[in-house]
Image: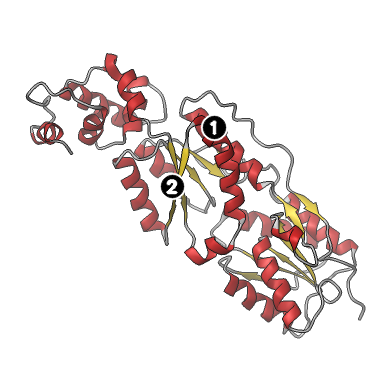
């Protein structure tokens, strides 16, 4: 912090001495908010609380920062950077091409407008909260793309308090306080996968899910159970994982050694499905003749492997692009949000076939 800014704070918010012109960063520091929040308070935009807006305007007045000069100052305060904070272990992120597809979709909309992504990995909720607070306090980002909507998710309220615009990647009906971008009817893809397996004669179908705290895990698992219940069939097993390679291998080995081995397994993403196919082949079984496998994401790797992976296409790049447009629009850019339409769809390839006989 410059000497003029420091003296402004030490003096209870008095204008800086020596004729130094106050800055938007000085106003943000005195008010205890981000520069984006100062912008919203001055322009009457965003979703700031009245108390926060009043505090910002009072800080601006005490420092002698005139609202009539705000336009130039706010333009210079723009970072043209959005945060993408991912709560995953580094080894899981490195092994999952999902985020590469997501970033491709985001950057395809951001880069032509001169915006970029600031990617951070965090281990848990406390580190995540502290990171957002630091990014806002330092004025390093203009907004954030949130991944993995969770039960009792604290991030929307946190970013609202910090004055950072945000969008959430997930089902449009997530019910949270930030705009959500995703394909409608998220459970449709899993339901279609189960119906496909049932038509092939499978009755012992297992599901390897992600963490139970994630809303999409709960939604897809409910669709899986409902589709089986409609056919008066119970799941062969449901195993929760953390999306890691080790967890996928452990889950698959447990299924393959069960007294009644399933004839088909649906995995929560393509990366785990690929691990499952590898474990099945190493166990001396064939895919799909002995075990049919379905993934979720429709990543390029599913088309490159043998057998090619039957999977649910959730159009990751398209959703990423839509999220970028929505966040740009929230930050005042001329971008049409244009949410994606149409539910996830099953893509049938070679990793599924008719159930083996008795």
Farthest residue toward the top? 68
Seen from the viewer's position, the closer of residues 220 and 79 is 79
Tell me the quarter of the picture where residue 277 sits: bottom right
**Quadrant of the snapshot with the N terminus:** top left
Seen from the viewer's position, the closer of residues 172 and 8 is 8
Residue at horizontal 36 percent and vertical 24 percent from the top: 75
Determine which residue is flagged by label 1.
112
Determine which residue is flagged by label 2.
155
From this viewpoint, is residue 64 visible? yes
Percent coordinates x, y for residue 108 in the rendering: 59, 38
Residue at horizontal 41 percent and vertical 57 percent from the top: 125
N-terminal label among 1 and 2? 1
Q: Vertical placement of 281 versus 52: above or below? A: below
**Quadrant of the snapshot with the C terminus:** bottom right
Residue at horizontal 37 percent and vertical 35 percent from the top: 163
Farthest residue toward the right? 357
What's the coloring here?
A: secondary structure
Under tag 1, what secondary structure? helix
Seen from the viewer's position, the closer of residues 42 and 212 is 42
> In front of the other: label 1 or label 2?
1
Q: Vertical placement of 159 versus 270: above or below? A: above
């Amino acid at each position: 912090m410059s000497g003029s800014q420091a003296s402004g704070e030490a003096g209870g918010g008095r204008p800086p001495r020596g004729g130094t012109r106050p800055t938007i960063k000085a106003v943000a520091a005195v008010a205890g908010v981000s520069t984006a929040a100062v912008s919203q308070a001055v322009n009457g935009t965003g979703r700031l609380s009245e108390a926060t807006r009043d505090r910002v305007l009072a800080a601006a007045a005490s420092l002698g920062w005139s609202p009539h000069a705000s336009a130039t100052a706010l333009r210079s305060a723009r970072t043209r950077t959005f945060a993408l904070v991912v709560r995953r272990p580094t080894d899981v992120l490195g092994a999952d091409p999902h985020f590469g597809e997501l970033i491709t979709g985001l950057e395809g909309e951001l880069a032509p407008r001169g915006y970029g992504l600031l990617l951070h990995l965090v281990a848990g909720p406390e580190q995540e909260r502290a990171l957002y607070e630091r990014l806002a306090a330092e004025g390093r980002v203009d907004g954030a793309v949130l991944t993995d909507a969770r039960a009792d998710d604290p991030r929307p309220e946190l970013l609202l308090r910090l004055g950072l615009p945000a969008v959430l990647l997930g089902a449009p009906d997530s019910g949270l306080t930030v705009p959500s971008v995703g394909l409608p009817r998220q459970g449709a893809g899993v339901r279609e996968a189960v119906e496909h397996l049932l038509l092939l004669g499978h009755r012992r179908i297992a599901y390897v899910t992600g963490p139970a705290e994630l809303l999409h895990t709960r939604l897809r698992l409910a669709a899986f159970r409902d589709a089986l219940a409609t056919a008066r069939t119970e799941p062969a097993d449901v195993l929760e994982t953390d999306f890691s390679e080790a967890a996928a291998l452990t889950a698959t080995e447990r299924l393959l050694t069960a007294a009644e081995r399933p004839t088909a397994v649906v995995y929560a993403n393509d990366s785990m499905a690929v691990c499952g196919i590898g474990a099945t082949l190493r166990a001396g079984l064939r895919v799909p003749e002995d075990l049919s496998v379905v993934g979720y994401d429709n990543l390029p790797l599913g088309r490159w492997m043998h057998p090619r992976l039957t999977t649910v296409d959730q159009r990751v790049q398209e959703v990423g692009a839509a999220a970028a447009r929505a966040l740009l629009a929230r930050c005042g850019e001329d971008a049409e949000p244009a949410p994606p339409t149409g539910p996830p769809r099953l893509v049938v390839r070679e990793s599924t076939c008719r159930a083996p006989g008795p």
